[in-house]
Image (tube, rainbow, N blue to C red):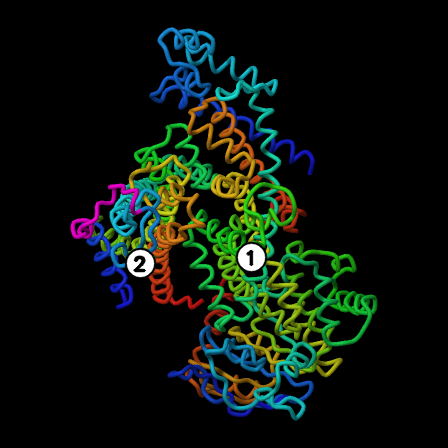
Amino acid sequence: MIEVNNLAVKTANKTLLEPLTFRIQKGESIGVLGESGAGKTMLTKALLQLLPSPLQVEGSVVVHDQDLNSSSNEQLRSIRGNVLGYIPQNVQAIFDPYRKIGVQMVEAIRAHERTTKREAKSTAIASLREVQLRDEHYNFFPFQLSGGMLQRAGIALVSSLQPELVIADEPTTALDEETKTVVLELLLRKQRDEGLSILFVSHEIDVIKKMATRILVLENGKCVERGPADQLFNDPSSSRLQSFLHYETVLQRGAMKND
Amino acid sequence: MSRTSWMYIAMAAIGLLMVFIAPLLIIQDPFSANSANRLLPPSSSHLLGTDHLGRDLLSRIVYGARYTVVTALMIVVISGLIGMSIGFVSATSGGIIDQVFMRFSEWMSAFPSVILAFLFVGIAGPGLLNILIALSLVFWIPIARLVRNTTVRTMQEPYYESAMISGVPHVKRIQRHLIPAVLPQVTVLLALNIGSAMLHIAGFSFLGIGIQPPLPEWGAMLNESRSYFYAAPWLMIVPGMAIFLVVLFWNLLSEQMRDEFDQKRGSGL
Amino acid sequence: MLRILSWRLFTLVPSIILLSIVVFLALHLIPGDPAVAYLSASQLPITEEAIERVTIELGLDRPVWEQYVSWFSSALTMDFGTSYMTGEPIVEEFLFYFPATVELSVWAFLTVILFVIVLGSASAYFRKTWVDYGSRLFSIVGASLPSFWLGFLLLYVFSMTLGIFPSGNRGTFAHYVLPVLTLAIPYIAIYSRLFRTSLLEVEKLPWMFSARARGLSEKTIWIKFQLRHGVLALLPVLGIVMGYLLAGTFIVENIFSWPGVGRYMMNAIVQRDYPVIQFYILVIACMFLLINLIVDLLQAWLDPRQRHQKDGVKHV
């Protein structure tokens, strides 16, 4: 459903993201693994065509036979949210702190669909229920929710627009273990039941393992390794992934000792 | 600093020199009244015309520069020294001194500086000296706040802490880390203050509670000849333009320095 | 809300009393005999005998603290003494001049708000175009103009030469245009630039990215997000501007012969009319404290985080 060909990000004299090519099928989930500063967030922003102007984006991002790199602002606007959903790492970065969650959901729904306020409101409330939030959270301000609830509300907002691909930029890094599981299960269920595609970006290997069937490993703005998840984890060739896995085993051993 | 900044500074230096040298070169006496020459328009003998008492406007403007400009510079130097020392002491000593200073400056900043200065003149009475004291008294507070906040922030930076741990002597730390962090911002503010001090001095003199006629202070000159403006517009245009251009110069200088400073820090608004 | 309001008002009282003591002492300790000032202000001959009589009449022979207590107790009944110049009660005189000043400053205030928002958002929206550069030029020039000169220029062009607007006094709408502009232009110049900066700061906030990523239109983002937060950030500044305008009308009133407090006060300063000066300083101080209080409350009310404050919940 999305085809990325030689996508690269450059400044006037430096390449920040080396040309990258991949595609995501309907219902598939791809994991992007990398340390902070490897260019993961840059990749997500480049996909959405939302990088600040001094950065140049090259290559193409094709969604429904339409190249986003050469689309008009209005075309891009109708694709963002509607086709490509985005979940940020920082839960405080989802909602405007000064307005109620429900109001912002309705605003987003009505930006893409001609509906009445009432219909949009019932869509929003249905989405909130789907993520195990209560109806009254519709009238809450963002600061009245805990981090985990806020991330769920963010997912409710994204899914109320019914996108085909969700780009999740470290959506669980800031969450505790329990909430993390809830959020991941939620995304996996949407993938299973509704054929949602997911681009899952993380530096946590266990999360990627759980979420992704295929994996890209980024290092310093370059894709150093790629392939199906099970194959990669069994036979890692890049030193980066090896050290990731090594670190993981050390952690697990340590955890076992503590038990 | 860039070439543009140096150009401004050179211009300021030349201007300041002119303030003291030019009156020696000017033949006409700025004070001698001559009723035969009343309200003459600009001509070759009086380049900027004459005022209602027949005094040459050009020599009055040149001679008068010292009052506005020099007083403003004095205010900025005095308030700058007071502000920097108090801000620095407050930041480095911390504790109760810092607390008291912060409370006091918060309370003072509830009132705009012009009004405070005006009220001070109201209490102490009109006059050049009182204006100098009043404006110095209100101008030091924002400078002290700026110095205090920047110093505190710098002292919390990792590089400062590591310099402290690795035993770099006090004086060296101040030289290497604190002064480079504080100085650019303070200079921007000081340049801005020169312009604003000039506007205040001229404003007070215009209202008749600053420098008094017959001294040719620019604001006082405007007030003195206001009833002749319709007949002799140059009496209005010339002194006002003089104030405007000098203030504009300092504001542009301040803006230029802030731009350079921002670029160095990498925020490109 | 009402309880917070009355508590905050109550906490202002010590500041005001302290200030009144400081001002009282300052006026009584500086060189210059109030008795002489009284005589010259009321245009009586200054003789030794007259000074002695006035000193006793005004109670200046008593210790300062006694004078303060008697001043303070009559102040509690809204009696702030009489003016040296006119012999009239100060409160009455002040209330006679005050409305003209309030009118002038309120109109200037509204003008400032309107132009700051329009100019600031135009230059942020069209940034790095001629709109932005033009407004930058305007703001540097406007901030460098002496306001008395600006007043004269406006008078010369629009009143004397073109004859569009009258040159002084109050009356019709046309009387307000020039004084209001003279008062407002410097503030518009300074604060439209500030507003532009705060709009661009909002642009950098993290949830602005999410708002774009969910496909909201630029119009929605501009009005509902950017402008809204920009105006909220402007609010404390607007309070300061209102204070400035109310207390800073001396020059404009002088130029346009506006019968307001500024001119009344100028006379008092030149004539050393101590009771009037003292009263005016207190009024100004109270005004500023009150304006700060209003801004604080307004901000708390507009910020949902403070409106719905739950204990122990801290937010970024």
Foreground of the two, B251 or C301 = B251
Q: Position of residue B99 (x, y in %)?
A: 41, 37
Q: Secondary structure at mark 2?
A: helix
Is circle 1 on the same chain as circle 2? no
The quadrant of the image that shows the C terminus of chain B is bottom left
Residue C116 badge: 1
Locate residue C17 relative to residue A78 in the image: left or right. Answer: left
Kindly tell me whether residue B185 is visible in this rendering: no
Q: Position of residue C92 (x, y in %)?
A: 60, 24
Please state the extent of the stretch shown in magenta in the rendering. Answer: B21-37
Horizontal relation, residue A10 to residue A173: left or right: left
Who's the residue at 47% across and 8% down the image? C57
Can residue B177 be seen in this snapshot?
Answer: yes
**Which residue in the protein does label 2 denote?**
B159
Residue type, label 1: Val
The number of numbered badges drawn on the structure is 2
Residue B14 coordinates in the image, percent (x, y): 21, 58
**Foreground pick, A58 / C52:** C52
Residue B20 versus residue A11 in the image, above or below: above
Q: Residues within 10 Å of mark 2 (few under 14, many from 20)?
A: few
Describe the element under mark 1 as helix, strand or loop.
Answer: helix
> Residue drawn at (33%, 54%), measured in percent from left and top?
B246
Badge 2 sits on which subunit?
B
Instruction: Report x, y in % for residue C80.
Output: 55, 20
Label 1: chain letter? C
Say which amino acid is labelled 2: Tyr
Residue at position x 52%, y 64% in the image:
C200
